[in-house]
């Protein structure tokens, strides 16, 4: 036979629409419009929590591409050529590079991923693409947790993953009428719930690596600025977001006047820019004098602090921290500051002990020099004159400090949160002209004058006060609690905190523990009054109550999920007497839980009895009733023969017996599609037989 | 019956994504990313059980197989029963021991229900063949895990020679006419309608009736006038073996259609003139197996 005709005939034998061509999978099958829309929907909701993290232009471009894809679907037009897609991809790459300066790291990576997913949507045509896109969107929705670790975002991400799972199920599990979405959602829910035990065990036992490395974490700074100048806290005064939360496992609260949360120490004053900086000297010299042993007085207080990611290297603690924090990762450095060796990019929880109201008694000569260093010739003569006057005829350092505070008092210095317009020399202007300013103005001017007068002094940045939560017994410190104060070294007393903002002004800082530390301020009165006008009286207390409760939920969340560190992991294992934690153990535990999961799931696999079996059960019941009356069934007897024989022997119950037998035979051997509804009446017939038999028996006994 | 589970090709793509999540979790020391990752792993494991269950209650029995000529399309059916109390979704059927790429899909099967699944395959060689093993597989519920099992069928079938050749009939022997016994189906004039049976050629389906909403019916045709014939191997001595067999097959089919008795002479076998489907099948099978090395595919 000629080969040509053979080939031709093979061609003729080819496809029918309902057959799947590919031997490996069905990815050649095209997607329905609903499926594409569903995945687009999942994509959109997964991007939502990232709105703040992705550049606006990229969001707009992504929205454009999504709309384009919808348009394609509606018009059933062809996908754009690969050149267009390539150009779009390169465009996103360049755009992100220009915007962020890098293509790696969390911020650029997420932005890029969103853009490229949108491009990939344009060519989504078959099942394989669909699956790959779904997986990538899983990953993308999870990246939201790299930016924000709150309970709400977590729940949101779980919901996103749930939606994606439903999507996968609808793609692979057609129902009788081609996938009802509700049963797919049910199945997804069941899968997630049944997967939970395994997830939990993996979470508990998966060995965590105490990652001291963090690759390229490009991200924006939030929190205290590294340099302090006249208006550096400006942006923080209105920022009500949480900086950290502190609770006190010892049960003892610090006194309200001691809520000075130490951040870092500023040593160097740059007179020409009027800026304080100087975290750097702390790295240059490691001062051995700043040890817990050199702190005198004070009360020991244990704090547990949940610190939000601030992209800096400071940990906060009450003045003065006495020892390292975060399991030694936060080292106690010069000036009693807690420093970590990399920037903090996630929420952490740490325990730290402080000696509240103590003083560091000694300082090294290097520190002495650093705390007196000032470029006096760059400072206006009026300021120098002031310093000279404070010292007078060789007054003691203490007297100089008191004189300076008195100077603020006498001249009616005022604390404000409203930004003042300062000129070239804010220091001079503050001290002699405007006399109104932020805490930075007070701390800065005070410290400068002290140094000019020859008193060793430094600026400390941190937070002051906080909001007390009565339900959880913890304090929430917000960005608007950011504060700067001074410390002077007095002979015999050591380093002493002087907060000119509080100690010298007519309008004191509000009581340290208040929800809104800075709002008792004239400038805010108007807006407050307006607010009051539009909110009913009962709302603020209710809102406050709600906020306190929610804070409590967040606190528990942080405690259990965020702070599950390698240390806690090994602690728990120790508690359970599993110190010899090894890979073998981990493996065994996993296998055990796998087994448990299988058991749990296979319970739902157990067969329910079918209606035929239920019918047989009713018949068995009938036979049992007759056997009780002395007529057991012979094993060769069919239902009809048996009931006829029984009716003969038990004439009193013959009617119900025969009635049952008829009905049963009809159900058992007749062509009845749905047995279920007939089973109830049949059971009643068995009851009728029983009743007739008992009555006959009673009759006999009488 | 062993149901085997494996990661599907899609599942293979998921693994790098999960690894990326793990890296992100480790690098950013992020417990929440860990939890989502572990949750996904949990779902993956549980879904494997569902995949397994989807096949475990399935029973597959051979159904019908229809005669086929080389160059045509082999059609056969499997009877699939869901013995479990859960619906079965998205099961595909594929013959394992051939290079056939066709896969039949059974999208949904209610608990206790049964369904006939039809498979097709193009064939181009005559002879006796065997469907050894069918592979039954599913990707339910998420497409990440693939479960499959093999059903040994050992199911023989014969592929008749290709219908090819246009030689005229050999002369009809004189005593033929007396045996004429009326109408036989398979001619050109319309004879009647009967129900369509799965696996049959769709060429004679009465599509107009289907369009009016009636069930699938097949039109049958009949012809009058028959004769008694001998189709002889020797008559085609100028052709090669395959062409001879093809021509003989054409003649036999035409003879059957004509309705009269016909006989077949092969070098090894002789079939006395007779009529009817049994005779037709015997003749065609003899042609199919003529020096066919006992079948098997090469």
Image (cartoon, helix red, strand yellow):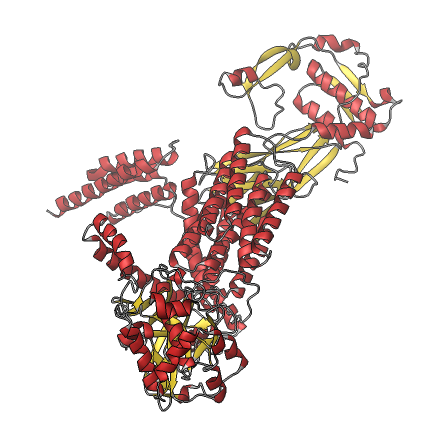
Q: Residue at x 81, y 14 (%)?
A: B168
State which quarter of the image contains the N terminus of chain A: top right
Position in image of residue A491 (x %, y %): 37, 90
- Residue A426 as seen in the image, left or right of residue B176: left
In depth, the one of B235 and A152 nearer the eye is A152
Position in image of residue A64 (x %, y %): 52, 39
- Residue A634 as seen in the image, left or right of residue A11: left
Task: Identify the image quadrant of residue B247.
Answer: top right
Q: Relative to A543, is A7 above or below?
A: above
Direction bottom: furthest residue: A492
Q: Relative to A364, is A675 above or below?
A: above
Q: Residue at x 48, y 18 (%)?
A: B213
Res B80 seen here: no
In depth, the one of A325 and A120 nearer the eye is A325
Position in image of residue A48 (x %, y %): 45, 48
How many discs appear? 0
Res A488 seen here: yes
Q: Relative to A474, is A153 above or below?
A: above
- Residue A132 as seen in the image, left or right of residue B57: right
Q: Residue at x 36, y 61 (%)?
A: A237
In depth, the one of A564 and B121 nearer the eye is A564
In depth, the one of A251 and B32 nearer the eye is A251
Direction right: furthest residue: B238
Position in image of residue A130 (x %, y %): 56, 43
């Amino acid at each position: 036979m000629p080969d040509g005709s053979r080939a031709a005939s093979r061609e003729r034998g080819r496809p029918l629409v309902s057959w799947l061509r590919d031997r490996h999978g069905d990815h050649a099958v095209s997607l329905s419009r609903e499926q594409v829309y569903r995945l687009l929907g999942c994509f959109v909701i997964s991007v939502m929590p990232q709105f703040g993290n992705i550049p606006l232009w990229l969001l707009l471009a992504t929205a454009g591409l999504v709309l384009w894809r919808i348009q394609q679907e509606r018009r059933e037009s062809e996908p754009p050529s690969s050149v267009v897609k390539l150009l779009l991809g390169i465009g996103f790459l360049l755009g992100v590079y220009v915007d962020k300066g890098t293509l790696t790291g969390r911020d650029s990576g997420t932005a890029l991923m969103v853009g490229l997913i949108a491009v990939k949507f344009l060519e989504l045509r078959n099942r394989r693409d669909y699956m790959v896109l779904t997986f990538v969107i899983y990953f993308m929705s999870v990246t939201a947790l790299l930016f924000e670790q709150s309970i709400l975002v977590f729940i949101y991400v779980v919901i996103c993953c749930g939606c994606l799972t439903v999507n996968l199920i609808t793609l692979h599990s057609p129902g009788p009428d081609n996938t009802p979405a509700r049963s797919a959602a049910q199945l997804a829910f069941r899968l997630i719930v049944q997967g939970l035990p395994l997830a939990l065990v993996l979470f508990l036992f998966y060995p965590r690596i105490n990652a001291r490395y963090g690759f390229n974490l490009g991200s924006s700074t939030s929190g205290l600025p590294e340099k302090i100048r006249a208006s550096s806290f400006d942006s923080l005064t209105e920022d009500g977001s949480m900086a950290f939360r502190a609770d006190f496992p010892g049960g003892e609260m610090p006194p309200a006047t001691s809520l000075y949360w130490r951040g870092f120490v500023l040593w160097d004053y740059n007179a020409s820019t009027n800026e304080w900086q100087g975290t750097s000297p702390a790295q240059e010299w490691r001062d051995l004098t700043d040890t817990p042993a050199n702190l005198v007085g004070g009360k020991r207080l244990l704090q547990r602090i949940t610190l939000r990611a601030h992209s800096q290297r400071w940990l906060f603690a009450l003045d003065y921290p006495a020892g390292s924090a975060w399991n030694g990762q936060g080292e106690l450095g010069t000036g009693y500051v807690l420093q970590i060796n990399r920037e903090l990019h996630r929420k952490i929880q740490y325990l730290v002990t402080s000696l509240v109201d103590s003083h560091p008694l000694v300082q090294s000569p290097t520190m002495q020099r650093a705390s007196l260093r000032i470029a006096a010739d760059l400072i206006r003569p009026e300021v120098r004159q002031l310093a000279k006057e404070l010292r007078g005829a060789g007054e003691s350092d203490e007297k100089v400090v008191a004189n300076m505070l008195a100077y603020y008092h006498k001249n009616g210095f005022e604390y404000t949160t409203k930004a003042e317009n300062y000129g070239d020399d804010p220091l001079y202007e503050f001290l002699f002209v405007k006399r109104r300013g932020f805490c930075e103005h007070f701390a800065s001017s005070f410290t400068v004058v002290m140094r000019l007068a020859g008193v060793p002094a430094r600026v400390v940045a941190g937070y002051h006060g906080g909001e007390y939560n009565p339900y959880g017994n913890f304090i929430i410190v917000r960005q608007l609690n950011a504060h700067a104060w001074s410390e002077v070294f007095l002979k015999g007393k050591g380093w002493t905190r002087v907060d000119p903002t509080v100690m010298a002004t007519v309008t004191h800082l509000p009581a340290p523990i208040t929800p809104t530390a800075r709002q008792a301020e004239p400038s805010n009165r108007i807006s407050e009054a307006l607010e009051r006008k539009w909110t009913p009286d009962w709302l603020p207390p209710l809102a406050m109550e709600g906020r306190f409760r929610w804070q409590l939920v967040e606190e528990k969340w942080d405690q259990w999920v965020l702070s599950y560190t390698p240390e806690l992991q090994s602690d728990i294992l120790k508690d359970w007497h599993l110190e010899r934690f090894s890979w073998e153990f981990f493996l065994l535990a996993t296998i055990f839980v796998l087994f448990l999961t299988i058991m749990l799931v296979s319970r739902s696999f157990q067969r329910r009895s079918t209606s035929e079996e239920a019918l047989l059960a009713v018949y068995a019941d009938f036979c049992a009733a007759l056997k009780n009356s002395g007529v057991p069934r012979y094993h060769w007897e069919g239902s009809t023969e048996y009931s006829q024989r029984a009716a003969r022997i038990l004439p009193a119950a013959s009617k119900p017996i025969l009635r049952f037998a008829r009905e049963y035979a009809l159900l058992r051997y007749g062509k009845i599609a749905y047995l279920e509804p007939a089973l109830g009446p049949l059971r009643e017939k068995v009851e009728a037989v029983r009743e007739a038999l008992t009555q006959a028996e009673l009759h006999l006994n009488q | 019956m062993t149901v085997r589970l494996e990661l599907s090709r899609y599942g293979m793509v998921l693994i790098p994504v999960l690894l990326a999540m793990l890296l992100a979790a480790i690098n950013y020391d992020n417990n929440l990313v860990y939890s989502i990752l572990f949750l996904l792993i949990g779902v993956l494991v549980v879904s494997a059980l569902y995949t397994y269950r989807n096949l475990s209650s399935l029973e597959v029995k051979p159904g019908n197989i229809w005669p086929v000529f080389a160059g045509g399309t082999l059609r056969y059916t499997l009877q699939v029963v869901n013995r479990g109390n859960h619906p079965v979704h998205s099961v595909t059927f594929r013959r394992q021991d051939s290079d056939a790429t066709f896969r039949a899909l059974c999208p949904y099967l209610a608990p206790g229900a049964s369904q006939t699944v039809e498979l097709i395959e193009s064939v181009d060689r005559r002879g006796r063949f065997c469907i050894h093993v069918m592979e039954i597989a599913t990707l339910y519920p998420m497409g990440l895990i693939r479960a499959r099992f093999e059903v040994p069928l050992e199911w023989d079938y014969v592929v008749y020679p290709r219908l090819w050749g246009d030689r005229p009939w050999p002369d009809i022997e004189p005593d033929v006419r007396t045996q004429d016994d009326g109408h036989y189906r398979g001619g050109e004039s319309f004879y009647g309608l009967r129900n369509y049976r799965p696996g049959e050629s769709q060429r004679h389906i009465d599509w107009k009736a289907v369009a009016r909403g009636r069930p699938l019916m097949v039109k049958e045709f009949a012809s009058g006038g028959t004769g008694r014939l001998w189709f002889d191997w020797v008559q085609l001595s100028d052709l090669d073996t395959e062409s001879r067999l093809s021509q003989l097959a054409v003649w036999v089919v035409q003879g059957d259609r004509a309705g009269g008795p016909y006989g077949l002479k092969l070098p090894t076998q002789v079939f006395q003139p007779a009529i009817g489907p049994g005779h037709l099948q015997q003749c065609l099978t003899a042609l199919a197996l003529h020096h066919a090395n006992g079948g098997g595919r090469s």
